[in-house]
Image (spheres, grey):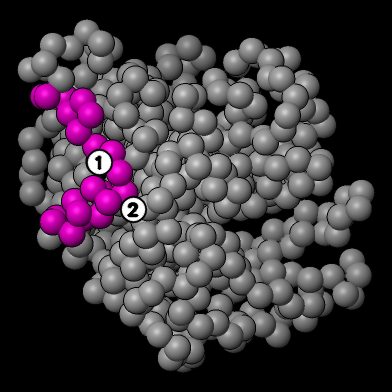
Amino acid sequence: MSASELVALVCCDLGSIVRGRSVLSDKLGEYLRAGVSWVPANHALTPLGPVAEPNPFGSTGDLRLLPDADTRVRVGAGSGASALELVLCDLVETDGKPWECCPRSFLRETLRELEQQLGARLLASFEHEFQLLIDSPPALPFTLEEQRLLEPFPARVMDALLDAGVEPERFFAEYAEHQFEIPVAPAEGVTSADRSVVLKVLVREIARREGIRASFVPLLNPAQAGNGVHIHLSLLDADGASLFYDAAQPACLSELGMRFAAGILRHARALSALTAASPVSGARLAPHRWSAGAMCLAQRNREALLRIPPVVALGGADPASQLHLEYRGADATANPYLALAAILRAGLEGVRAGLPAPPILDRDLAQLDAREAERFGVGALPGTLEESLRALADDDAARAWMTPLLYDAYVSVKRAELDAARDLDLEELCQRYAAIY
């Protein structure tokens, strides 16, 4: 390791952009104790570049980016590229107290509430789709040929993810042009969202080294399938047993799991402001786009916002350890810490309120009549960021999940994005966001 190598101390901001400062790698130990300087207004930067105006921070205040040494990641130097090393950070006050607008701290506090109220621990994973922006004609969807045409990128990105401790499970071609997916193993607590941040950074880094561009934009081409983030989650008790599994219940989902799902569905429209967080996100969530066209709970149906993936008996795996919920309404423009925390808080609301079990969709959306389509929330998710922000503002419980400062900061960033996007059509927006994400 060269004495001049840099290590980046980074955070994921409200627009899901990774920002930070770099220090000499051999001096990292000095920064683990007190971090590096940061400014509240940096949290008002929009994904499009400028600072959101107005914003609640102005030019005042000082913070620290405090590195979490357990998140240190290093990818060795490659041909024509220096090593990439980074450490994820918490945003703290100058005395070390968590800053109320720190997304990582927001998730950590949510996990404490989950444990206090339900005695539960979280096991979660983020399943990302992305596209490579290349001019060559694509092979057919889901084919080995499409993967092999891109070698050595697939092998190199999996190596980098393995070295980083992200635990990738599979790599495969998806449906849209040059679209791929990398599911990763579930992890406990904040680590699951950390892996989402690291995966996106490393996929882009390895693509850059191969002379190509990787984009996690929610929608690259309005006529094609988009890129989602499927958030898989289950709750465990203190002994590691699933709180969601009950073989005697419909779909094997326990009473607690049903109430948790009901809470997510009750607040689903407000959640979209935090999980589908860009001006292009809503278009991906329309019915018949294989995303989240129905605001309902379903079993083995990839058009539902909330899905119960199948329990596989083949191979003798424990069914209880497999049972989980899959939230399909997120994308890479969402801050993973905020998105996961909001989903958990919505679920907690459902458990606290003792909400009844939601109906389980068991058919394709095309088979539903008008009355059934309304019952299962077909097309009920917000179609625009404007609509989802209104839903968040109108949902008192969801708005209260955040402190007033965090809520105001988040909304100011999103309002600034809407203002900047106002004169662009959907195709232009897709191209603009493809260059960012």
Question: Residue 118 location, x and y as percent?
Answer: 22, 53
Residue 199 showing in the rendered view: yes
Q: Nearer the viewer, residue 3 or 305?
A: 305
Residue 243 showing in the rendered view: no
Q: Amino acid at mark 2?
A: Leu
> In which quadrant of the rendered view does residue 255 lie?
top left
**Left or right, 10 with reference to 91:** right
**Left or right, 360 with reference to 192:** left
Q: Residue at x 39, y 23 (%)?
A: 290
Q: Nearer the viewer, residue 417 or 344?
A: 417
Quadrant of the rendering where the N terminus is positioned = bottom right
- Asked if residue 391 lies in the magenta stretch, the reply is yes
> In which quadrant of the rendered view does residue 384 lie?
top left
Marks 2/1: CA–CA distance: 12 Å
Mark 2 vs mark 1, foreground winner is 1
Q: Residue at x 79, y 77 (%)?
A: 24
Asked which secondary structure carries label 2, the reply is helix
Q: Which residue is mark 2?
A: 274
Question: Residue 309 location, x and y as percent?
Answer: 37, 24
> CB of mark 2 within 8 Å of CB of mark 1?
no
Question: Residue 277 location, x and y as percent?
Answer: 38, 50
Q: Which residue is mark 1?
A: 382
Please report the bounds of the magenta region as a residue range.
374-395
Q: Which class describes the residues within 10 Å of circle 2: few (<14), some (14-19), or many (20+)?
A: many
